[in-house]
Image (tube, rainbow, N blue to C red):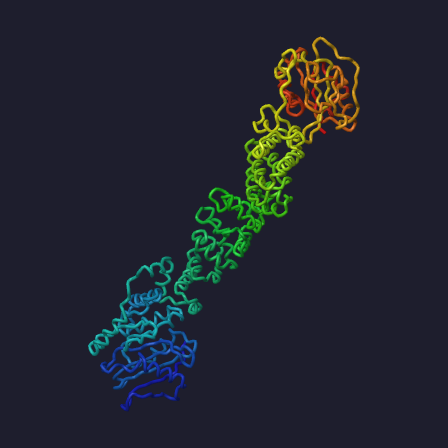
Amino acid sequence: MSDPQLISVKWADTTGTGFTRQDDGAPPPQPYVMAAQRLLNGDLSQPPEALRMTLPHPVWSMRTVDVGGQQLWCFVVQGRRGPFGVAGTCWYLFAEPGARPADVWTAGCELAAADHEDLERPDAGWLAAATLDVLTAVLVPGREQQALPGTPAQNRFAIEAALKALPDWAAERFTWSTCLLQRPSPISRPVFSGRWPEQFRAADPARAAQLDKVLPPPAPEDERLTVKLDAGRRRAALTALAGGEPLPEDLRRYPQDLVAVLDELAVRKHGLTWQDVASYAAANRMSELDHPGVEDKVEEWAHNRPRDAWDWIDRQRQDRLAVPAVRGLLAAQADRKFTLPLLGATGDVTDRQRDLAGLLRRALVSPAERLDEVTAWAGAGGPLSRPADLLRAHDFLLLLGIRPVDAPRLFPPRLAHIAAHIDAARALDDPAAEELGRAPVPFDAVIGLVGQLRRPVPVDVAASLLVWAIKDQQPLHREDIRRAVIRMVRQGTAERRQHLHAWVTDLLLGTGRAHVSRPPLREVMHAALSVVAEQRPKPLAKDDPLREVCLRIGVEQDAPPHVRKLLPLPPRPQYDDGRDPGGRFRWDEVPLPTRIMLAGGGVALVGVVVWAVMHAGQQPPAQTHASSQPLSSQSVSTATQGGGGPGPDNPPVAASVGLTVNVPIESPALRDEVVRALGADTRPVLRIIVTGYDDPKTLGGLGKAKTVGKLLQDHMIGDKRIPQLSGTTTVDTTAEPAGEKTPAGTVRIEFFFG
C-alpha cells in the first residue's frame, strides 16, 4: 500500500462566520473546486438540519468523480457540531490519478479519524462475514445497492476490507459510505452504505425511513449467485478474499468479471482444471490461458462440454487452443456425445469448412489418423453414415487430404455431377468413369445416373455404362440388366422415335464389341427389344440392321414372347421318315463323311468348331480335302458333301457354316488340318477335350460332356438337336508336348478365338 497525495477542498463553519469554503494553505486548482461544488450540491452535502450532532459516528463516503475530464477518487467527510462546527463540515479529499481505491480509503480514514475516538476494529469473524456480503452482492447484477450490516464505525473497516478484495474496476462502480446522510440521487451509481444509527433515527425518523427503502439488507443467496459459484473453487476463492487474503496486484486491473478473478485465483492456488477452461471460454478469455498443461485441459473441457466448445471454436477458429479443442470434440463424437457439424446445407465448401478442415489436419497429424477418423465417421451412427452425407462431404474430405484412391468407399459417385457432365459433353470422360467406378452396386448407379440426366443418354455412353456394370457386378442378375436397359432406351424414346431401331442397334453392337459374353448380351437384347415392341410390335424387316444384329447374337426357342414376335424363328424341319429333329441326337443319324465345319458368327467372336461324328459300321475316306484359306467372308459358304437342302443327308446347321474337311476321327492329323484351314496367321488358344465313351454308335459314354454341347448350341449352332453334354477339360493346345498322340476313341472339340 502507498499513501496517495490528496488535494483538499473544504466547506465548514469552524469560526462561527457561517458555512463557507475554507482552504488550508494554497487554494486548490479550480477543476477540483468545481468537482467539490457539484458534490456539495448533490447527495454528499451539508448535514441535514435535523441532525444536531453526528459524533461519535464517522460519516465518511467515497466515489470517483470527474475532475477536468479525469475520473478521480474523492473521499468525503461530513459532520456537525464538535470539531465540525454548528453549521457542519463537508471536506472533499481528491486522490491523484491512478490511485488505488483501498489506498485512498485508508488514507482518508486516517486523516478523518483525528476528529473521532474509539473507532475500534471489529472481530475477524464479523468482518469476514460483512465483506463476503459485499463481494457476493458485486457478483450478482441488481443486488449491488444494499445496506452494510454494522454501525458507521464498523462499516469503516468493512469497506476497507471489501476494497482490498475487489479489483479496481469493481470498486469504481459504487459509492461507498459508512452512513449516507442524503438519499442517493437517481443518477448516482449503486451504493454500499450503513443504515442510520439510533441517534440519527431519533432526530429525523422520516429521512431514516426513506434511506431504509433504498438500502435493503443483504439478500440471502439466490439461484443467480449459486450458478456463478457452482464451481466449488470459486466459492473457496471468494471466502479467502473476504477473510483478508490479499488480491494480487496484477489482478486489480483484471478483465471486468469478478468470476474470472475468482477462477484465476483458484487456478493459481490449485492448478488448472477443465472447469476453469469452461469459465475462461464463457468469459471469452481463452487467449489468456497460458498455464502449464493448458492444452490437455482444453481437450478435456471440449470432451465434457462439446457444445460450448464448438460454439467457441466457431467464433475463434484461428485461436491457438482451437486444435486441442477439436481433439476433444473428436473424442466426444466417438463417445456419441456430440456430432461435428462438418457440412453446410448444400455441401458447398465455406470458409467455416475450410478452417475446420485445417484444424482437423492439425489435430490428426498423420494421413492414417485422418483416414481412420473419417472411416469411423462413415460408420453406423457417425456424422457421415448416410450415403447422402458422404456425397455432400466429397470436397470436404479432399480438404482433409483424403483421396478416393485411398478410400473408395468414402467417395460414392456423385451421380448428379456426372450426369451434368454427360449432358454438357455428351460423353463419359475418364475422370467421370473413374468416379462412377466406385459405386458399390454398379447397376443401381447406372439407373440412378440415367435418372439424373436432363437429355437422352448418348448411345456410346449407354453401351459403356452397360459394359462396365455387366463386367463389374457379381453376381449378375437378369433383372438388373433389364431395368437398366429399359431405363436407357425409354428415356429418349420421344425424341428418337424415328431412329429407335438404329439406336438399339448401336447399343447392341457397342456392348458386343466390348467382349460381353453371350448370356448377358442376350439379356441386353431382350430388354431393348421390349421397348422396340412397345413402339411397333411387328416382326423386324429382313433388311433392318437391328434384325441382323439380333440374329447374330442368337434367338432361342425359349426367348421372351416379344422377342419371338419381332424375330420369329423358322419352323422346325421334319425328316421324311418322321424322326423328330428336336429329339435326342444319335451318331447313327448323321451321314458320312465326318464333318469339320469352320463357322464364324456372333459379335466380336470368330470360332472354329470341330464336330466329329461317325456313321456306325462305316469308315470315312482316308484322303483329305481342305482349303488353306484364312477364315473370311469370301471363304464362308455352305459346302456340304452332296449339296442340297436340309434333309436326312444334310441336317440344318447355323448360318455361315464354312468349308468341310474330310478327316478320319482317329486321324492324328485332325488338329493340324483344322489349323491349316484357319490359316497360318491364326493360332488356337483353347481346346476342349471330351473323353471316355466306349461305344461310338451312341452318346451314352458322353454323359459328362454337357458343357461342350451347350457351347455349341449357344455360340455356333442354335439348334436344339445338339446333345446336352457335360464334363469338359480345357488345356492350352500350344502347351501340348511334341508328338502327343490323340487317344483312340477320343472326341476332340476345339474352339479357336481370334
- Rendering quarter of residue 43: bottom left
Residue situated in front as seen by the camera: 507 or 445: 507
- Rendering quarter of residue 547: top right
- The residue at the point 75 percent across, 21 percent down is 659
- Rendering quarter of residue 31: bottom left
Q: Which quadrant of the figure contains the N terminus?
A: bottom left
Give the percent coordinates (x, y) of residue 255. 43, 66
Q: Is residue 142 left or right of residue 539?
A: left
- The residue at the point 65 percent across, 11 percent down is 577
Residue situated in front as seen by the camera: 127 or 362: 362
The mark tally for this picture is 0
Give the percent coordinates (x, y) of residue 415. 56, 44
Residue sitting at the far bottom: 17
Q: Which quadrant of the figure contains the C terminus?
A: top right
Task: Please determine whether, in this image, residue 557 is positioned above or below residue 278.
Answer: above
Q: Is residue 123 left or right of residue 690?
A: left
Residue situated in front as seen by the camera: 30 or 272: 30
Q: Is residue 611 left or right of residue 177?
A: right
Q: Is residue 302 left or right of residue 153?
A: right
Give the percent coordinates (x, y) of residue 533. 58, 32
Give the percent coordinates (x, y) of residue 256. 41, 67
Residue sitting at the far top: 617
